[in-house]
Amino acid sequence: MDALSDKELVRRYRQGDNSAFTQLVKQHQDRLYRLACINLYHEQDAMDVTQEVFTRACKGLKQFRFHSEPFTWLYSTLKNVCFEYNRKHSRDKEKHHDSDNLMLQIEDRSNTETTQYLIEIKELIKKLPERQYEVVILRIFEGLSINDTAMMMKCRPGTVKALLNKAQKKISVLQG
Amino acid sequence: MNSQNKDKLDNLIQQYRSISAPTDFSIKAYNSQADRTIASWFSMPSLPVTASLLTVFLIAGVVIQQNLPKQAFDGYPDMGQLSSMNISLHHTDSDKMPGLTDLGQIPDLTSIHMEIKQQPNHKPENKIQQHQETKYFIHTFS
């Protein structure tokens, strides 16, 4: 992750250079979209969630204070938006008494190969606690370094290693 | 190291990283933010805008009042005159409210009493008549 160029892009955007924002979006939209897919109950919401994140970034990055990396800010925003969407869907699920049929309808709609792999990944790591789940996604699937993962999770690198170790003990496939 | 698990994991990682955004979000983000900005103008007014409008109206009101022609206030005392004016209320004969005796309909009570007194021979024949006369007196002049 080229942190320096991200910060420079945000600086230029704050000075009125909209092309800097466009470049920032193009650099990170794939990663954010993937993270949205894996963190949402329903991956068909990933487009809406990703768009919401960048819409908030349009305004939010103008007041960015550079206490952290810009992508850390984007990732935090993504987690918040995913939480809102998941909470909304869990409420909708409670309203529908026949929740099993609802899940089947959703899976029928999103019957693509990508979705199948996402379902397989989720099935693999769904039993992990939230923090271990997050470490596995960022460190193993996204391929971020220990330091970058720690920065995004707002913890120490040692904590990242400990969480990863625990996750790998629970799921043998993750040991590679 | 389990090679089967390794292959499975590598395959999953590769498939995961091949996922890409289906559209360019930069344009959508701009349009969405612009739509929200416009929508906010037509929803609750922002405090600075409201305060500015109120200030403009207040200033405009003061300016208009100061620019009214002097003729508009003719006939009306100004504040200086009002403060020095001694307003007193006094009765003149013409201002006196008519009393009951002036109405003409109701006779003077004192004259009736004197009239009754001046009739030396008038004596109620009995107490009943006296009571009736008193009753009539009270009824008529109450």
Image (cartoon, rainbow, N blue to C red):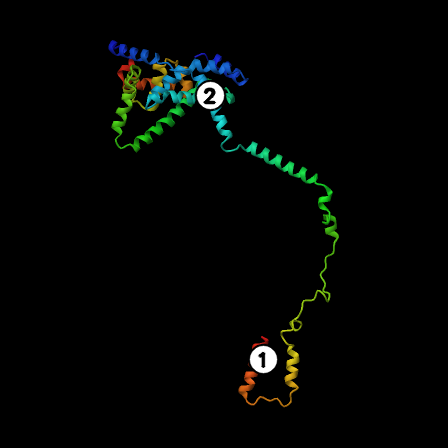
- Which residue position holds label 1? B137
Please state if A136 lies on the left or on the right of B104 as rendered. left
Percent x, y of residue A162: 35, 19
How many other residues sit within 10 Å of disc 2, few (<14), some (14-19) or many (≥20)?
few
Residue B134 to residue A41: above or below:
below
Residue B96 to residue B4: above or below:
below
Percent x, y of residue A43: 33, 21
Percent x, y of residue A137: 34, 17
In front of the other: label 1 or label 2? 1
- Which residue position holds label 2? B31
The residue sitting at 58% across, 77% down in the picture is: B140
Quarter-wise, where is residue B122 in the image?
bottom right
Viewer-proximal residue, B113 or B71? Answer: B71
Percent x, y of residue B139: 56, 77
Mark 2: amino acid: Asn
Viewer-proximal residue, B52 or B10? Answer: B52
The circle drawn on residue A80 is: none
Viewer-proximal residue, B14 or B137? Answer: B137
Q: What element does badge 1 sit on?
A: helix
Q: Are marks 1 and 2 on the same chain?
A: yes
How many other residues sit within 10 Å of disc 1, few (<14), some (14-19) or many (≥20)?
some
Chain of residue at mark 2: B
Chain of residue at mark 1: B
Quarter-wise, where is residue B63 in the image?
top right
Quadrant position of the C terminus of chain A in the picture:
top left
